[in-house]
Image: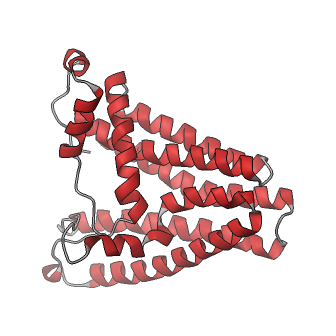
Amino acid sequence: MNAQPTVSSDARATETYREVVRRLGSAQKPAARSAPAYSRFVNRRLGRYLAAWAYRAGLTPNAVTGLSALATFTGIALLAVLAPGPLLGVLVTLCLVLGYALDSADGQVARLTGRGSAAGEWLDHVVDATKIACLPLALLVGLYRAGTVETAWLVVPLVHAVAGSVLFFAMILTEQMRRARGTASVADTGGRLPWLRSLLAVPTDYGVLCLSFLLLVVPAWFFVAYTAIVIFTVLFVAAACVKWFRELNAPVADLGERDI
């Protein structure tokens, strides 16, 4: 998070909510062409609205991260303790969608207030790493307690926990090693049909995973959709790791600016 001049409370109070939203829209970092559709087209916009609210309320970026964690881990806890059904599906989806939007908002608040920091970025990553591991494990516990699926199928959330953690770690490590090699990672926003790549990445989109819990109205439907998400995630992790390994194994002179 890049620091900018800190905005005074007086200046913050004179801006209307709409003015802050417009300023965020013009100041927001461009989305990478490879960003999945929900994260790129929906979550960033929701995060902008929440960031404008948080900014006018005087919340710090770390406070927004804390609210994101509270919403997300409330949904995760509900998965583990409540039986699958319509009520659980709606509650979990609302919590996860809100938590994800706030996860987008904290960085936007940091850019508006100039209060971004390495510690804040670290906190954001730790929360992300924790939720990636805990969400499928909480689902596993909830399904096991409810007895709604055959025990053998519980391997699916276990695989998801491993694949999600590997992907997150590999992505963060690749970024750090690029920096160590002097390679800049820049969001690629151009190219032909930039939206097509986003649509193709939909099955691996965390936002789509959040919305999939609405299918808990019929647990069998949910598990079919969830299994498909996990399969696509595993395939994506395998392909991404091969790509990143080859990139980092190449001579430094062959590396240019990269897009995750």
Quadrant in the picture for residue 198: bottom left
Residue at the location (49% across, 58% down)?
207
Residue 63 placement, left or right of 185: right
* Colour treatment of the image: secondary structure
Residue 138 placement, left or right of 165: right
Q: Looking at the image, which is closer to me, 37 or 96?
A: 37
Residue 84 placement, left or right of 102: right
Residue 169 placement, left or right of 135: left
Q: Looking at the image, which is closer to me, 201 or 234?
A: 201
Quadrant in the picture for residue 216: bottom right
Quadrant in the picture for residue 156: bottom right
- Res 48 visible: yes
Q: Position of residue 238 (x, y in %)?
A: 47, 81
Q: Position of residue 8 (x, y in %)?
A: 21, 19
Q: Quadrant of the C terminus?
A: bottom left
Figure disc tally? 0
> Residue most toward the left?
253
Residue at the location (38% across, 62% down)?
172
Residue at the location (49% across, 35% down)?
67
Q: Quadrant of the N terminus?
A: top left
Q: Is residue 52 above or below residue 141?
A: above
- Res 113 visible: no
Q: Position of residue 105 (x, y in %)?
A: 37, 41
